[in-house]
Amino acid sequence: MTLKASLMGLMAATAIAAPAFAEYPARTIELTIPAGAGGGTDTSARKLAILLEEMLGTSIAVLNVGGGGGSVGASQFMQAKPDGYALFATWNSPLTTVPQVQDVAYSLDSFTPIASTSETAYTLCVKTDFPATTGAEFLAELEANPGKYTYGNDGIGGTMQLAAERIFQAKDIDAIAIPFGGAGETLQNFLGDHVDIYGGSISTVLPYVQSGEAKCPIVTSAADVPALEGASGLEALGLADKETLLWRAILGPKDLDPAIVEKLANVIEEAVNDPGYVEFLATKGEVPNVVKGDALGARLQSEYDALAEVSKALGL
């Protein structure tokens, strides 16, 4: 092949690729959610999808694939083509926690980070007659009574258990972890007095705090959470380095075109900061949080490494 022919071939390929990207998206995007309908990630992703449809000028079909703490949906999604028409709306646990305690078919390298969307803390809550109200009092009560109190969580090795144990290990606290099938099940057992402490997402327990049936002495974020007035953030307790957050993100398949990643990340950032979406997040005790591309990949890796240390200490 002559140099002229090679250059003409390259120019032709470029001419084809450029319009193809300029037209993206040209058809329906499938958004996989690794959880059943109605949960926190599902409702957040569906709300976001409505905004993204308007901004991208295309339809988004939502596919719920629950099971295995998110691992079933993640394993299925990693087979998707990296063409921009398959996206993954997840929370952090299936990527940074579940692989610590389950044999899964994927790793962090199986995905292309696009952008995170929101974040919130987990919380530890008790009934109103519990002999502690502030975070400091709560930790002191647990420390003074090793093995006395039980706390519900979202499963053995789940993010909530690891978040709690990061705090408990730092204070030499011995509390008994009782695993359930998610925050909803944890809540019901807490309300039914089957466990002493609720451990889970804020949005699940918030109505019961507002009705006076529960109080939450502590959250797992460094800062306080406005939705839980009176709950201590970890920085106030000298435990800021033990922060563990529940956060959500949009990812693509491995090897997704960087130009598509950039376009999607920018549109997601715009959607997340839409006033209506910000207000929606606030009702769930969440705040917008956008970390894009490689920075999101670094965040995933950092959290994975930190939780691996806790998992190892627990023998999981």
Image: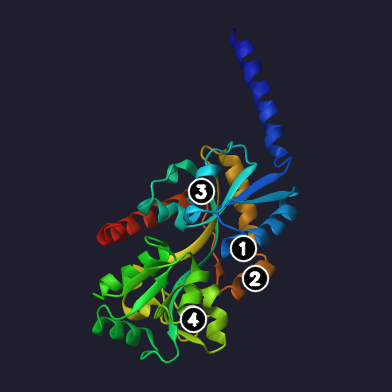
Q: Rounded to the nearest whole Å, what is the CA distance between mark 2 and mark 1?
A: 9 Å
Name the element at disc 1: helix
Relative placement, left or right, of 226 versus 17 is left
- For the N terminus, give its image quadrant: top right
Q: Which residue is mark 2?
A: 280
Mark 2 vs 3, N-terminal side:
3
Mark 3 vs 1, N-terminal side:
1
Name the element at disc 3: helix
Mark 2 vs 4, N-terminal side:
4
Judge the density around disc 3: few (<14), some (14-19), many (≥20) Cα neighbours within 10 Å.
some
Mark 2 vs 1, N-terminal side:
1
Q: Which residue is mark 1?
A: 44
Mark 4 vs 1, N-terminal side:
1
Q: Which residue is mark 4?
A: 191
Q: Amino acid at mark 4?
A: Leu
Q: Rounded to the nearest whole Å, what is the CA distance between mark 2 and mark 3?
A: 28 Å
Q: Are marks 3 and 1 in contact (CB under 8 Å)?
A: no
Residue 55's x, y, as percent?
72, 53
Residue 149's place in the image compared with 290, above or below, is below
Q: Looking at the image, is mark 2 or mark 4 nearer the viewer?
A: 4
Name which quarter of the figure residue 5 lies in.
Answer: top right
Q: Are marks 2 and 1 in contact (CB under 8 Å)?
A: yes
Q: Amino acid at mark 2?
A: Phe
Q: Amino acid at mark 1?
A: Ser
Q: Looking at the image, is mark 2 or mark 3 nearer the viewer?
A: 3
Mark 4 vs 3, N-terminal side:
3
